[in-house]
DNA sequence: CTGTTAGCGCTTTCAT
DNA sequence: ATGAAAGCGCTAACAG
């Protein structure tokens, strides 16, 4: 049979209630009693029953982290940072919270399903990462779900995704300044003399895509340059998409001198495609990424990109999730990226 | 207040038990009743209480995945694959299970702590990934823990880590053939004429490190070549370690013509260090990796490495974890890697 | 096929 | 500071 709280209690010669208090540590217990209980726990090799605690306390030690894809370092770094902060003291007995990482593959309905699953688990907090899908119906559904989660005591944090006012107050949003980053990147290319710039954007329906595209166009507009017709291609946030898009773009606008890619991964695919077509980077075509993932510095040429403080922001989210950090005033914080110029961009030929 | 099973029951005009049966789907219920219940669930916007179910059923739908570091693509890919198979949205067969990803940072005590936490949650399964630490005490402690987990009905799967006989039967081990992979890599270098080969190995206390090193030396021995004194340096499985180790190695053995690195990440660090010293890869020094992570193909030169079927093995582990796949006979399976020759290796000068 | 009846193991007022 | 007792919401025999 499994050892229960009462077993520990009788062994220690106290009541179950006292054992519970010792284990949860959030209630005064005489030092002597405490030690006796702890010893009994040890001797019996007792392990608290999580589900039972959660049922009685109406909350669990689980923190949900929704990501598009765990295998993508962008999300891996964030998830890792969140997790690094949700352990430690401050939790229930044992003091550690567990991260439930859910890969949605970017599918709206999975996002909703996972949110329900997390609601079912009475998660202590939920962190939604990555750009949101801009569909009014889905948006409303997510907002409704988040409202319920919030009402049930679950902390909700949006990371790298815009605020959702109708999800209720108490929802924290840590967003990246994608617009400003993209603007800087394009401005950098313009300063190098580029005028014929192609754009390999992400999936059209995502906020991240829209914002980066807006930043790009803003820079163009500021310089009084018209965006080339047919110079934008959309695709997934992956390498294959970058590879394919370069083909499309070059077919439509053969004399491009630069390409801004949706992110680093896409940029690498683009570079590979360019090389295969006999075009050198950056001598013939400059290429930019976004995010500054670790491999970007090792690519040859190393990518010019915008560094996003993924680790720091993830850690912040983790601390807010556990109540260790207060949410930003107004429930919203815009996190800036930083232009990192490396070898993949150069003066126009 | 929150909606409970009985609320749904009375609304549908049935007993709570019937509602439970409908929701769990593993018991015959008349179609008409079923529909009425489902409608009531919908109307009341009912969400099952996970902790309560888990308490009553003495098992949860949580699957723990222990990894060194979620941010490392090696583990991210595995975690992603495991998760894709344990149900949840997209997965079929009533199995909506959640992956609890735990980053241990490679620390033995964190491994134990997480195992206890998962035991507390009555996890349905636990997947331990990555090489094991070769400390007798820790090894015994993990075995004891796993025995308890197994006894409590938790399925235990070791992925990329050697079997642990004293963890009891019923523990499945899917191990990578690190030895054979490393042997092939070194044999490949030998065939290219290299004789002065340096080795940037991983942390000395891990099984992965030892096996890869053994494979390397086996190849050397087979060719009747003596391992150079001072030609092996140990370090973490990260880029910085590869970078640093090249310095050490070259100081001790300046005329190396090839370097076998602990893995791809380390290899990239090594390449960077080599380049900075004015040495070309592969003209002056050949370099090999291990794992074949996605970025390895994009590095320039692309890495010669051993491809490990991370995705496939992770998926396999996920299916075994949920009981969808039967464990291999004998509880053990050796997964082979595949030599992938690319640009980072070439004939000796 | 469906209802009844007991708990599952813990937390938490409320007393003392 | 500690104990007693009343659930938390669900599942699983066991009947019918």
Image (cartoon, coloured by chain):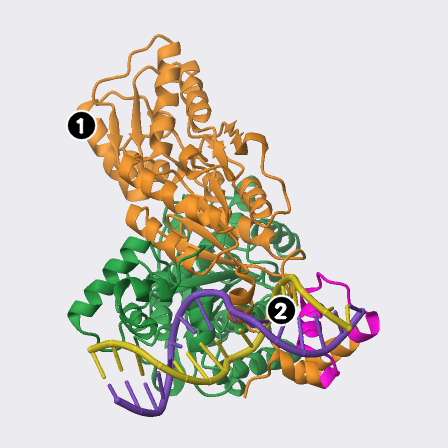
Chain colours: A orange, B green, C yellow, D purple
Q: Position of residue A70 (x, y in %)?
A: 41, 53
Q: Position of residue A165 (x, y in %)?
A: 43, 33
Q: Nearer the viewer, residue B320 or A342?
A: B320
In three-dimensional space, the C-alpha distance between marks 2 and 1, rounded to whole angstroms, equals: 55 Å
Using the image, determine if residue A328 lies above or below residue D8.
above
- Identity of the residue drawn at 56% across and 52% down: B242
Residue A116 within the magenta-colored segment of the rendering: no
- Identity of the residue drawn at 47% across and 73% down: B55
- Could you confirm whether marks 2 and 1 are on the same chain? no
Q: Nearer the viewer, residue A129 or B256?
A: A129
Please state, as top left, top right, bottom left or bottom right, where the N terminus of chain B lies in the image: bottom left
* Main secondary structure found in the magenta portion: helix
Residue A14 within the magenta-colored segment of the rendering: yes
- Identity of the residue drawn at 66% across and 76% down: A16
Identify the residue position indicated by label 1 in the image: A251
Q: Are marks 2 and 1 in contact (CB under 8 Å)?
A: no
Q: Position of residue A152 (x, y in %)?
A: 48, 51
Q: Secondary structure at mark 1?
A: helix
- Identity of the residue drawn at 82% across and 70% down: A31
Using the image, determine if residue B332 lies above or below residue A63.
below
Q: Which residues are magenta?
A: A11-33
Using the image, determine if residue A288 lies above or below residue A157.
above
Number of marks in picture = 2
Identify the residue position indicated by label 2 in the image: B108
């Amino acid at each position: 049979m499994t050892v229960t709280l009462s077993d520990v209690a009788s062994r220690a010669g106290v009541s179950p209630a006292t054992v519970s208090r010792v284990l949860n540590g959030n209630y005064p217990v005489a030092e002597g009693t405490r030690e006796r209980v702890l010893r009994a726990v040890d001797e019996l090799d007792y392990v608290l029953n999580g589900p039972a605690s959660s049922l009685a306390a109406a909350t669990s030690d689980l923190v949900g982290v929704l990501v598009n894809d765990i295998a993508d370092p962008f999300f891996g770094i964030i998830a890792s940072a969140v997790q690094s902060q949700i352990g430690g003291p401050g939790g229930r007995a044992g003091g550690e919270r567990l991260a439930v990482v859910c890969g949605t593959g970017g599918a709206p309905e999975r996002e909703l399903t996972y949110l329900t699953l997390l609601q079912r688990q009475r998660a202590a907090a939920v962190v939604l990462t990555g750009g949101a899908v801009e569909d009014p119906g889905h948006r409303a559904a997510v907002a409704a779900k988040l409202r319920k989660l919030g009402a049930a005591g679950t902390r909700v944090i949006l990371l790298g995704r815009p605020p959702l006012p109708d999800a209720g107050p108490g929802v924290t949003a840590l967003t990246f300044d994608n617009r400003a980053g993209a603007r800087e990147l394009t401005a950098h290319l313009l300063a190098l003399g580029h005028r014929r710039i192609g754009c390999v954007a992400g999936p059209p329906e995502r906020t991240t895509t829209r914002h980066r595209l807006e930043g790009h166009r803003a820079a163009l507009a500021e310089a009084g340059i018209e965006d080339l017709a047919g110079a934008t291609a959309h695709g997934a946030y992956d390498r294959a998409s970058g590879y394919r898009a370069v083909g499309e773009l070059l077919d439509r606008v053969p004399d491009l001198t630069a390409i801004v890619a949706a992110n680093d991964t896409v940029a690498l695919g683009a570079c590979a495609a360019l090389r295969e077509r006999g075009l050198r980077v950056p001598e013939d075509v400059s290429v930019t990424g976004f995010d500054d993932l670790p491999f970007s510095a090792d690519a040859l040429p190393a990518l010019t990109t915008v560094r996003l403080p993924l680790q720091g922001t993830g850690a912040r989210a983790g601390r807010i999730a556990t109540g260790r950090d207060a949410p930003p005033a107004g429930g919203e914080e815009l996190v800036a990226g930083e232009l990192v110029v490396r070898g993949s961009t150069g003066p126009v030929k």
